[in-house]
Structures are given as structure tokens and as C-alpha cells.
């Protein structure tokens, strides 16, 4: 049957599909717009399956903290090209996924691979999963898209977020403070920038898991042995090298990026603001 150009345009506005695809879907649905939407969705998901194996090296990090600083989330969403990473539709998808993660109680204080949440019902549309939402975007945008990982923090203290390089690095940080004022925010912003730039893995020496510490000690001891160091001084050498390990991997032991004569821990203490860093999550595009 013949369909009107007005209906074709209306369907295009509703779905984002091409004019010809909208016209064909309306003809197949005999002018029924809702049925045509379903036809486009099915065909779009089929197209998305064909693109699913393509490599995704570009994309963006998105991070958000609620106004009361009690809840925050961060994701890495990948695509094939930098051009699409800057695309409004792709960025809208990232924001919707982030909002979804923040909306569901089951995601509280969870982090992991993006595949963990693909089967969840999308919070805005119960009849659609997060995976289907992404597949629809793949069909519309024309590139493979992958939700690589996510992190969500919920706290009785406070959260802060930081984004660097137009979405190439993101930090979600939990901190404790007697109050939140401009001085506190400036300090935690500096700490978040430190995390983004220097890639620490642990907040403090005390938070390093014992198995990680023992493995590091074992490696350092073996290195010293292979260098021919005497047995009776091995422990002293290991302790010296561990200090260097702490300075590289532990946030509070790192040299502060704005004043390398002080550690981050010293800067926080000397501020007199009573700030305590509880935990952090750092994402860098490309899985780093």
C-alpha cells in the first residue's frame, strides 16, 4: 500500500532509521506506525548482530555523582572510531546507560564487566534490556558498540568525580570529611587529578591485599638473589625496594603532582580539613 511522506518522516523522527527503511517498514506494516516500529527494531537488531564482532578501540568514559554526593557511577563505552565517540547519539546512549546503573538498587556498590548488566531491564522501558538498547544504537549509528566495564559507589560519606581528556580518563572517588565546602572540594579535586595522572592502585599501604604484598616481596627477594646479593641482607634490600613500590602504587605515598617534595598523604594531613580518602575507581579508555 502507498504510505504518506508525513508518516515516513514521523517514523524516522521516532526511530532514527533511514527514510527508505521507514518507508519499507510502513508498507510492510500497512501503514501501522507501531507495527512499523517493531519491524524496524527487529531488522535493526539483526543488523547489529552482524557488527558485533568488529573491534572497538575508541569510545569514552562517563562518570556522574548525584547532587547529594551519596551515589555515583562510571562506565567505559567503546565504539570503532573517534568520530562516533563524538557523535551525539553515542554520547546520549552513554548517558542513558549511566543513568540506568544509578537507578537500579541491585547495582549498588558493584563494579565489573559491562556484560554483567546487559540482561537487566532498561529502567526507562521495561520491555527492553540494556543489551537491546545497545543493539538498537548499533543499528542506528552503524558501528559496533560495547559496554566494557562499570563501577557504582554508594556511601554514607561523600563522592567526587573527575573526567580528563574529554572522556579518556575518569575517576570516581569516595572520601570522608566533617563537612563539604569549597576548600574540601578543591582538595579532593587535586587528589582525583593525582589518581588520573599517576595511576595508583591502592589508597594506603594498609589497604594492599596481603597476597599482593607477599607476591611482591617474593619477586623482589628473587630479583635480589639473582643479582648475587648475600642472604643475610636480602630482607633489608626487599624492604628498601618495597618503599619504591609504595611510592609508585599507593596513592597516599605518591609524590604530589603539584608539589613533589610532599606526598599526597602529607598534603591531605597538612590541609587541616579532616579529609580521609576511602576508595577510588579509575578508568582509562582502552581498559587501562
Image (spheres, grey):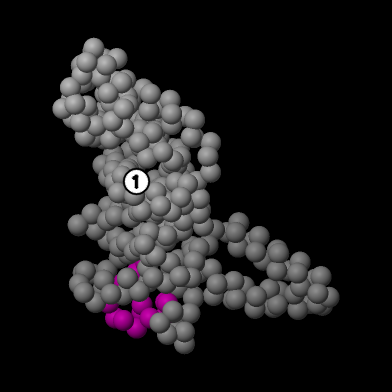
Q: Looking at the image, which residue is at 24% across and 32% down?
A: 12
Residue at point 27% right, 23% down?
A: 23
140 sits left or right of 32 in the view: right
Q: Give the range drawn in magenta.
A: 264-277
| Residue 155 falls left or right of residue 199 | left
In percent of the image, x 21 and y 69: which residue is there? Answer: 179
Element at label 1: helix
Residue in the image at 70% along x and 77% along y = 237
Q: In this view, does 72 lie above or below 116?
A: below
Q: Tell me if I can see residue 283 in this picture.
A: yes
On the image, the x and y values in percent for residue 89 come to: 31, 44
Nearer the observer, 174 or 281? 281
Camera-nearest residue between 116 and 284: 284
Look at mark 1 in the image and give the residue it sits on. Answer: 90
**Would residue 2 be counted in the magenta stretch?**
no
Picture quarter containing residue 156? bottom left
Amino acid at each position: 500500500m502507498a504510505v504518506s511522506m508525513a508518516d515516513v518522516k514521523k517514523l524516522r523522527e521516532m526511530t532514527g532509521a533511514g527514510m527508505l527503511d521507514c518507508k519499507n517498514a510502513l508498507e510492510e506494516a500497512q501503514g501501522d506506525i507501531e507495527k512499523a516500529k517493531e519491524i524496524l527494531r527487529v531488522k535493526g537488531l539483526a543488523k547489529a548482530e552482524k557488527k558485533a564482532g568488529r573491534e572497538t578501540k575508541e569510545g569514552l568514559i562517563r562518570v556522574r555523582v548525584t547532587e547529594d554526593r551519596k551515589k555515583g557511577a562510571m562506565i567505559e563505552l567503546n565504539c570503532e572510531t573517534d568520530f562516533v565517540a563524538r557523535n551525539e547519539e553515542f554520547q546520549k546512549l552513554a548517558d542513558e546507560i549511566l543513568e540506568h546503573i544509578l537507578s537500579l538498587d541491585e547495582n549498588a556498590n558493584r563494579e565489573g564487566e559491562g556484560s554483567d548488566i546487559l540482561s537487566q531491564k532498561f529502567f526507562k522501558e521495561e520491555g527492553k534490556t540494556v543489551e537491546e538498547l545497545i543493539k538498537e544504537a548499533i543499528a542506528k549509528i552503524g558501528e559496533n558498540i560495547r559496554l566494557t566495564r562499570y563501577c557504582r559507589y554508594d556511601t554514607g560519606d561523600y563522592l567526587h568525580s573527575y573526567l580528563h581528556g574529554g572522556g579518556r580518563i575518569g575517576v570516581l572517588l569516595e572520601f570522608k570529611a566533617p563537612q563539604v565546602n569549597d576548600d574540601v572540594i578543591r582538595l579532593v579535586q587535586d587528589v582525583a587529578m593525582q589518581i588520573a595522572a599517576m595511576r595508583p592502585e591502592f589508597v594506603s599501604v594498609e589497604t594492599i591485599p596481603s597476597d599482593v604484598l607477599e607476591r611482591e616481596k617474593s619477586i623482589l627477594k628473587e630479583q635480589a638473589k639473582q643479582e648475587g646479593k648475600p642472604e643475610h641482607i636480602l630482607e633489608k634490600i626487599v624492604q628498601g625496594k618495597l618503599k619504591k613500590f609504595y611510592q609508585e602504587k599507593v596513592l597516599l605515598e605518591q609524590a604530589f603532582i603539584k608539589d613533589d617534595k610532599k606526598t599526597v598523604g602529607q598534603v591531605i594531613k597538612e590541609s587541616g580539613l579532616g579529609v580521609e580518602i576511602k576508595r577510588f575507581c579509575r578508568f582509562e579508555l582502552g581498559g587501562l
